């Protein structure tokens, strides 16, 4: 698999190698260091990049990533629109909008000095389906379709409808040519790119044998037609029985009415799905797989990467969200725990300055983080050199902080191990990392902070 060319950076092969001082989690305490760094700014600045699709499992930060990319692109001069499929209100709130709907809305507060602008919208799959009907049927037939109970159920919740309508909306936005960059936040999915699979499945259903069979009685007409219905539906009695319970006793009549009204539109569904699928394979599209540094999330990311490769979709790279770091990475978990135990036993605070370890505990060693509080070595003369209550409290607090640091270092070790497994499987995939934040992103400033971490600048200590 060859990632999109804009994703590379520096070096003889277009990739910037990093070491412990440029993104590694070595003694300097930097974030995890990918061997190939994703150049997000180069991707956003490339005028040939017209569509960026953020895909990945649920709960890994796709919506926030898509919004941050849109903000940065707009502030670097692109006319961008962010299309989210996520029904949550996080995107609207972070962009200062009271709500998002099926119509792109301008986002105020974005720096437009470079000539860029940003719009945002949230997919309304039923409204998008209605728009297709209204655009491709005459007014009388459109009204009949929109009122049909089977259509209302199909457009509101049929399996694959959301993903199909996401593809339809993407095609509509691209055809309008109002924006030079479309950022798509895909639905969360565990079954590997339903965003790509479901449109084909729904298109096959609408253009398949079942629909054609239902169309035949209406075309045959009269008693012969009813005889065909009785014979043709006999084998589907159990199926229709279930659907009748879900959709009402008039299911068959509603389906036939729907099919008759939609007869001239069925071919268009398959054609538009195929056209959008080809658009996603084109050179102007870039897929970003979004994940967290956790085993399940990166396993899913690996599956997405492999599936995109199999479908010849242009992969730009991996965005690794919520990566943890430490400003005291030189102090290992083992040494921190040993120091905490020493403090709890009084081994450090009881010894005089310049003396050896009272309890034989290991010395922190040269260059290590100072784990003692100078004030903790002061003794109260009235208590014959015994530690004061304040000293005891300081010692317990320091021990607790050391144990917290040990847990943090163990987390970093797990993240590095998980990240290394992914890199071993897919060393060619460029990676951009975003540090874990203390709180949720809820405004443009937070989105800019995410975008700056995604930018080409080297990672900084955390």
Image: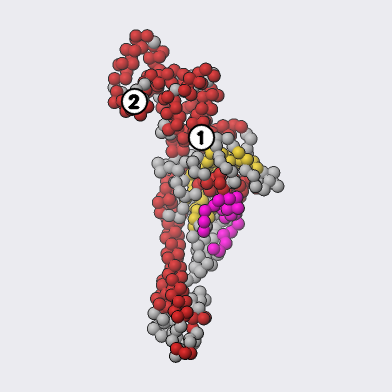
User: Residue drawn at (55%, 39%), measured in percent from left and top?
Assistant: 100
Mark 1: secondary structure: loop
* Apparent side of residue 345 relative to residue 372 in the rendered image (left or right): left
- Helix, strand or loop at disc 2? helix
Q: Are marks 2 and 1 in contact (CB under 8 Å)?
A: no
State the CA–CA distance, disc 2 to disc 1.
26 Å
Q: Nearer the viewer, residue 91 or 316?
A: 91
Most extreme residue toward the front is 382
**Can residue 54 be seen here?**
no
Relative depth, front residue between 403 and 98: 98
Q: Quadrant of residue 224?
A: top left
Q: Earlier in the sequence, mark 2 or mark 1?
A: 1
Residue 98 spot, x, y in % from top left: 57, 42
Q: Range of the magenta residues? A: 438-462
Residue at (42% x, 78% y) in the render = 343
- Pinpoint residue 221: horizontal percent, then vertical percent: 39, 10
Left of 245 or right of it: where is 20? Answer: right
Residue 448 located within the stretch drawn in magenta = yes
The relative height of residue 327 versus residue 124 in the rendered view (above or below) is below
Residue in the foreground of this view, choosing between 95 and 83: 95
Q: Quadrant of the C terminus?
A: bottom right
Give me the disc on residue 319. Answer: none
| Residue at which label 2 appears | 244
What crowding class fits label 2: few (fewer than 14 Cα within 10 Å), some (14-19), or many (20 or more)? some
Residue displayed at 54% across by 45% down:
91
- Which mark, residue 124? 1
- The answer to whether residue 211 shows anywhere in this view is yes
Image position, residue 240 (x, y; %)? 32, 24
- Mark 1 nearby-residue class (10 Å; few <14, some 14–19, many ≥20): many
How many numbered marks does the figure carry? 2
């Amino acid at each position: 698999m060859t990632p999109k060319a804009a994703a590379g950076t520096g070096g003889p092969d277009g990739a910037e190698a990093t070491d412990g001082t440029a993104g590694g989690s070595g003694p300097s305490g930097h974030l995890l260091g990918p061997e190939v760094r994703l150049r997000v700014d180069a991707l956003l600045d490339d005028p040939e990049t017209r569509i960026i699709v953020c895909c990945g499992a649920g709960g890994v930060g796709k919506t926030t990533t898509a919004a941050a990319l849109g903000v940065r692109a707009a502030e670097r001069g692109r006319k961008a629109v962010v299309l989210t499929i996520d029904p949550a209100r996080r995107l609207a709130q972070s962009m200062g909008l009271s709500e998002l709907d099926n119509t792109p809305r301008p986002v105020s507060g974005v720096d437009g000095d470079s000539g860029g602008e940003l719009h945002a919208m949230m997919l309304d799959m039923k409204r998008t389906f209605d728009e297709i009907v209204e655009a491709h049927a005459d007014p009388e037939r459109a009204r009949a379709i929109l009122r049909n109970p089977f259509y209302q159920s199909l457009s509101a919740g049929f399996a694959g409808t959301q993903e199909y309508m996401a593809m339809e909306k993407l095609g509509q936005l691209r055809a309008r040519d109002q924006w030079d960059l479309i950022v798509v936040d895909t639905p969360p999915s565990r079954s590997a790119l339903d965003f790509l699979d479901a449109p084909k499945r729904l298109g096959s259903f609408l253009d398949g044998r079942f629909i054609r069979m239902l169309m035949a009685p209406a075309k045959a007409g009269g008693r012969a037609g009813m005889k065909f219905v009785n014979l043709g539906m006999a084998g589907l009695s159990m199926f229709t029985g279930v659907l009748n319970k879900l959709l009402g006793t008039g299911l068959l009549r509603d389906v036939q009415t729907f099919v008759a009204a939609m007869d001239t539109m069925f071919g268009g569904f398959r054609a538009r799905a195929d056209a959008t699928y080809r658009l996603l394979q084109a050179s102007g599209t870039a897929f970003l797989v979004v994940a967290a540094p956790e085993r399940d999330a990166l396993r899913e990311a690996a599956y997405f990467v492999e599936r995109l490769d199999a479908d010849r979709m242009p992969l730009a790279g991996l965005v690794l969200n919520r990566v943890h770091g430490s400003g005291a990475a030189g102090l290992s978990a083992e040494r921190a725990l040993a120091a905490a135990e020493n403090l709890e036993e009084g081994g450090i605070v009881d010894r005089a300055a310049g003396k050896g370890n009272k309890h034989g505990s290991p010395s922190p060693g040269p260059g290590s983080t100072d784990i003692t509080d100078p004030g903790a070595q002061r003794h109260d003369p009235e208590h014959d050199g015994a530690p004061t209550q304040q000293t005891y409290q300081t010692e317990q607090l320091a021990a607790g902080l050391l144990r917290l640091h040990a847990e943090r270092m163990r987390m970093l070790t797990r993240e590095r191990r998980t990240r290394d497994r992914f890199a071993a499987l897919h060393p060619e995939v460029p990676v951009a990392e975003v540090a874990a934040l203390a709180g949720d992103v809820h405004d443009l400033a937070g989105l800019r902070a995410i975008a700056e971490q995604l930018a080409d600048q080297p990672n900084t200590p955390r």
